Image: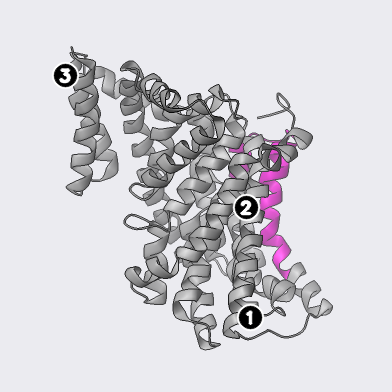
Amino acid sequence: MNSGVAIAILIVTFFLLIILSFPVAYAIGIAAVLGMMYMGLNLQQVVQLMVKGVFSFSLMAVPFFIIAGEIMGKGGISDRLIKLSDAIVGWMHGGLAMVNIVASMFFGGISGSSAADCASLGTILIPMMVDQGYDDDFSANVTMTSSVQGILIPPSHNMVIYATVAGSVSIGRLFIAGYAPGILLGVALMIYSYYVSVKKNYPKGDPFNFKYFLKTFVDAIWGLFTVLIVVVGVVAGIFTATESAAIAVVWALICGAFIYKKLTFKDFWQVLENALNTLAIVLILIATSSAFSWCLTYLKVPQIIAGAIMGVTTNKILILLMMNVIMLIFGTMMDMSCNILLLTPILLPIAQQIGVDPVQFGCIMILNLGIGLITPPVGSTLFIGSAISKVPIEKLGKTLIPFFAVMLVVLAIVTYWPAFTMTMPNIIMPVGAGV
């Protein structure tokens, strides 16, 4: 067996099937099967590896987080978070843009999904911004870029997937670490939006009113309590990530159906349908990626790539730059979960070899791939933003360039300033302190 030919079969088959518009999960699975056939391995091993890939206690948290996010999206939380955000920052120049970003920060901390954030808040805020005189492309771009906070600020099922693939990485430490880059991204987008709002003379909102703030805070706190259940429960060691996610689902049901009284029985079935559709995609990706990743490991591809990178340079700054470029490129071509499953076994060992903590690298990867969600040709959030705003993707792609620049600055800080990401988890949840 020629290992070079085997690697070529895996990679070429995968990308050829992607070009032919095969679903990513099937492309990965078929490539793994053809690779194993060439290597003369028993194809029963494909099935065993797929089952082993999804046979993980940590992954049980994923469906619960997805369901909780869907329930909160249907349960009336969006309106209340927008009102709370308006009370906090709506008085500023370009107030609705600021409201959009802060609402995404809150909602992302509940849904854990960029697409859900963009769909739920965008349908309300994009038309509202356009009616008040904001450009349609600017309104869509603010909504899409700020939604990336949702995959950084916990709970995030993508972080759970990364922790599972990475091995001995604490989900609790990942959750805490996600706050700093998530909030920084929001602040950076607010600064840029303020600059654009002043330049284009976008309107201000009403002056700050403490009574209105207090009223909206009390109204929204029941939904925000979902975040406390997950994060505090995991960090304090009261629950595992899976248990906290399950409790979050129960609380979300109570909140949506009985407190806000927005979630109907019909909505609940729609929630389950949406959650099952998402979960089916995630699980089959995990299953087929397990077989594909095993083939890459068997053929020593991670060692080959690490050797190639180290052969170019041993400079930590340049190595991190090359890994960021790789993740950004892959993020434009494939779904986020798929990229986490494929790239983590390859790039994480390199990161650890140059002294990058797996928790910090998780934040670097999540932010990189989050940028991919709003980048052509496969960015799912980009498609949602375009559909809601009715602005062509081609136009959005051009006007997103300054927003990309802002996000890349945040990425550079997360990449090259370890203390920025790691200080909170090291203080609140030192190594070995929990899940």
Using a 10 Å C-alpha cutoff, classify the residue at mark 3 as few (fewer than 14 neighbours), some (14 to 19) or many (20 or more): some
Residue at 65% across / 30% down in the picture? 435
Asked if labels 2 and 1 touch by Cβ distance under 8 angstroms, the answer is: no
Q: Which residue is mark 1?
A: 198
Horizontal side of residue 214 vs 309, given as left or right: right
Q: Earlier in the sequence, mark 3 or mark 2?
A: 3
Q: Amino acid at mark 3?
A: Tyr
Q: Which residue range is magenta in the image?
A: 219-245
For mark 3, what is the residue?
38
Question: Where residue 264 appears, x then y in whole percent?
Answer: 51, 67
Q: In this rendering, is residue 242 above or below 126?
A: above
Q: Is residue 425 visible?
A: yes
Residue 230 lies, in percent from the top left, at 66, 45
Give the residue type at disc 2. Gly
Disc 1: CA contacts within 10 A as few (<14), some (14-19) or many (>=20): few
Queried whether the magenta region covers residue 244, the answer comes back as yes
User: What is the quadrant of residue 417 in the picture?
Assistant: top right
Q: Could you say whether the residue bearing mark 3 is in a helix, strand or loop? A: helix
